[in-house]
């Protein structure tokens, strides 16, 4: 995410790192480079200039020149200001109502329908929320079908009226239907056009007036940079939306939209979408995003994702096996499954401070675990639960079974042994309980 911007900011800070004496000139050069990095990331020049003027004032005020580590202090100033520019505090999302009505608007292809599905999936996972999706894109039968399929996939009912050509009446009927079915959130996916057009705007505005939504979310493709910001302006003038959803942050996004949309329309970003899968949705936290832009990782989000996938019963079982030095291949595979559910591997690694930059050019696919899984799958159940059984001839058979080289199987077995030794030592030292909060 934002690799180019990250690199450029990093090199701007280098000016202040490892310098014997810091001068005003060093600071001015750094600030200028930060400005250039932002403009290259498609942040509007005026915003970039205002931002860096503020950084400069703060750098003088906080005496970066005399600081013990001027580079670090400067990074902190930039991080705080970036977070502020992107919205400061996390913006609340209002899903309360009887039912709560959420209107989704944006251009065609921005990711509205995908986001509608993700939002329904996200809200459904919160206790007491029971969403209804509404297909109000009357122009494209394919959009209705897409929503129907998504609804089926995530187990959320979709309100469809394929013959009805009046989006307002569909929205009204859907709200009435939600009331009668005890659905407490209605998510209305509206039609988009390739560019802003009057008819589309009228239609969304009419739906807004007819159903009076708690939230109007404007969905925008973050890859489109300043265009995204300009489109946001037009939509906001007409709809006075309550929040922004930035999509496709998993792509090669430069960062301009994320950084400048809040400043331009004075509406907060509420969600970011970073993939095509239904669980690739994050609540937007300006502070965490600023940290990620600066390559500082995002441990808080990583821990939250782990908690979402955490299966307490299974964790207890595995913990007890580790304590008895009985951790086996079946447990290992169960652990892999849990990690995989946390999301895209490269994205996860990127949340660890300092790692993102190092792996940005590596091709880490979600298939990273496939080789290991194939090896484990090629073992008999007996071998999986008793790794000590696996001698030379069994290794050969396992390698043949999964189409791998014997050397790969040997390497994996060795790693597994090392891991078990480490667990044994931790048990001996009694370190396990201390290191793993909550037991694991
Ligand atoms: P709509 O026309 O606004 O409803 O847009 P869609 O929801 O149909 O999305 C357009 C395309 O973008 C589809 O191919 C989606 O799979 C894809 N898409 C949507 N959100 C994301 C995202 O966050 N990341 C990526 N990589 N693709 C996305």
Image (spheres, helix red, strand yellow):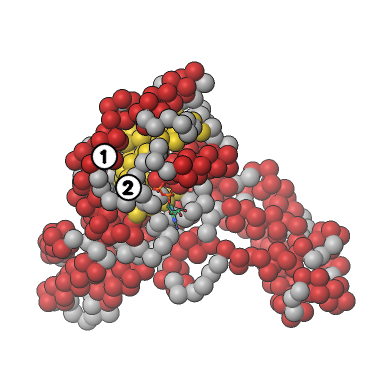
Quadrant of the frame with the N terminus: bottom left
Of labels 1 and 2, earlier in sequence is 2
Q: How dense is the environment of label 1, judged by Cα within 10 Å: few (below 14), some, or many (20 and up)?
A: few
Q: Is residue 338 visible?
A: yes
Q: In 3D space, how far apart are the residues under numbered discs 1 and 2 (Cα atoms)?
A: 10 Å
Q: Is residue 323 left or right of residue 249?
A: right
Name the image quarter holding residue 412.
bottom right
Q: Nearer the viewer, residue 412 or 43?
A: 43
Beta carbon at label 2 within 8 Å of ligand 1: no
Q: Is residue 48 left or right of residue 75?
A: left
Q: Which residue is mark 1?
A: 199
Which residue is painted at 69% across and 47% down in the image? 314
Q: Nearer the viewer, residue 238 or 346?
A: 238
Where residue 302 appears, x then y in whole percent?
A: 48, 54
Q: Is residue 77 left or right of residue 137?
A: left
Where residue 31 appears, x then y in whole percent?
A: 17, 69
Asked if marks 1 and 2 touch (Cβ < 8 Å), the reply is: yes
Beta carbon at label 1 within 8 Å of ligand 1: no
Name the image quarter holding residue 32.
bottom left
Which residue is painted at 34% across and 45% down in the image? 192
Name the image quarter holding residue 334.
bottom right
Q: Which residue is mark 2?
A: 193
């Amino acid at each position: 995410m934002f690799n180019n911007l990250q690199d450029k900011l990093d090199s701007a800070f280098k000016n202040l790192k490892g310098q014997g004496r810091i001068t005003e000139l060093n600071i001015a050069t750094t600030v200028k480079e930060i400005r250039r990095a932002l403009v290259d990331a498609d942040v509007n020049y005026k915003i970039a200039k205002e931002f860096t003027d503020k950084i400069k004032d703060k750098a003088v005020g906080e005496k970066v020149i005399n600081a013990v580590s001027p580079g670090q202090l400067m990074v902190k100033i930039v991080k705080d200001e970036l977070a502020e520019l992107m919205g400061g505090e996390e913006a609340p999302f209002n899903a309360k109502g009887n039912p709560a009505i959420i209107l989704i608007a944006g251009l065609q292809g921005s990711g509205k329908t995908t986001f509608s599905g993700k939002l329904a999936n996200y809200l459904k996972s919160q206790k007491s929320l029971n969403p209804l999706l509404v297909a109000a894109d009357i122009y494209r039968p394919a959009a209705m079908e897409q929503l129907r399929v998504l609804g089926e996939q995530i187990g959320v009912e979709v309100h469809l009226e394929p013959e009805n050509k009046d989006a307002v009446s569909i929205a009204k009927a859907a709200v009435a239907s939600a009331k009668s079915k005890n659905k407490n959130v209605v998510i209305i996916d509206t039609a988009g056009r390739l560019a802003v057009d009057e008819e589309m705007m009228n239609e969304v505005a009419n739906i807004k007036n007819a159903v009076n939504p708690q939230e109007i979310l404007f969905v925008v493709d973050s890859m489109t940079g300043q265009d995204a910001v300009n489109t946001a302006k037009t939509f906001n003038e007409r709809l006075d939306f309550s929040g922004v959803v930035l999509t496709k942050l998993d792509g090669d996004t430069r960062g301009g939209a994320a950084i400048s949309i809040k400043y331009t329309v004075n509406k907060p970003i509420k969600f970011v979408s970073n993939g095509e899968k239904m669980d690739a949705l994050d609540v937007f936290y300006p502070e965490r995003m600023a940290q990620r832009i600066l390559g500082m990782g995002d441990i808080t989000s990583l821990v939250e994702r782990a908690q979402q996938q955490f299966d307490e019963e299974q964790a207890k079982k595995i913990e007890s096996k580790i304590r008895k030095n009985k951790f086996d291949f079946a447990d290992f595979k169960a652990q892999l499954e849990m990690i995989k559910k946390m999301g895209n591997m490269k994205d996860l690694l990127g949340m660890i401070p300092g790692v993102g930059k190092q792996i940005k050019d590596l091709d880490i696919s979600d298939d990273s675990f496939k080789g290991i899984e194939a090896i484990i799958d090629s073992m008999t159940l007996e071998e999986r639960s008793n790794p000590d059984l696996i001698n030379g001839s069994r290794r050969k058979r396992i390698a043949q079974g999964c189409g791998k080289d014997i050397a790969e199987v040997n390497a994996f077995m060795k790693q597994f042994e090392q891991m078990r030794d480490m667990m044994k030592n931790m048990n001996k030292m009694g370190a396990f309980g201390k290191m793993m909060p909550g037991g694991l």
